Image: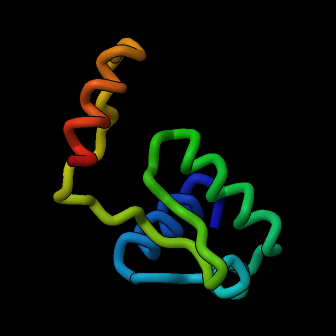
Amino acid sequence: MNTIKRRAAIKDELQNQKLISANQLARKYGVSRQTVVGDIALLRAQGEPIISTVNGYKYQEESTSYHGVVVCQHTFEQIGRNWKTLSL
């Protein structure tokens, strides 16, 4: 199996399983663990949302919750006035 086919197979494997280790993938495709780690790194560089855990690799699950940053700026006077209101 050539490199491109192996990476495609690893991608399919990750999409179909919840969690799989680099050692399992290495045994399955007859390559070293380090080769699999490199393949995963290249897949990530291509934009694949693969995350690593202590137990192996998996695709990042899509979140339905909102993640964002709220930015605001208050003067010291406004902070003091609001804090007094909240503490009553």
Residue extending furthest toward the front: 88
In the image, residue 25 sits, relative to residue 68, either above or below, namely below
In the image, residue 8 sits, relative to residue 26, either above or below, namely above
- On the picture, is 49 further left or further right than 79? right
The spot of residue 34 in percent (x, y) is: 82, 66
Q: Quadrant of the N terminus?
A: bottom right
Determine the residue positioned at 20% across, 37% down.
85
The spot of residue 2 in percent (x, y) is: 65, 59
- On the picture, is 75 further left or further right than 81? right
The spot of residue 51 in percent (x, y) is: 53, 62
In the image, residue 17 sits, relative to residue 67, either above or below, namely below
- On the picture, is 25 further left or further right than 31? left
Determine the residue positioned at 27% across, 60% down.
62
* Front position in the image: 41 or 4: 41
The spot of residue 53 in percent (x, y) is: 60, 74
* Front position in the image: 4 or 24: 24
- On the picture, is 60 further left or further right than 32? left
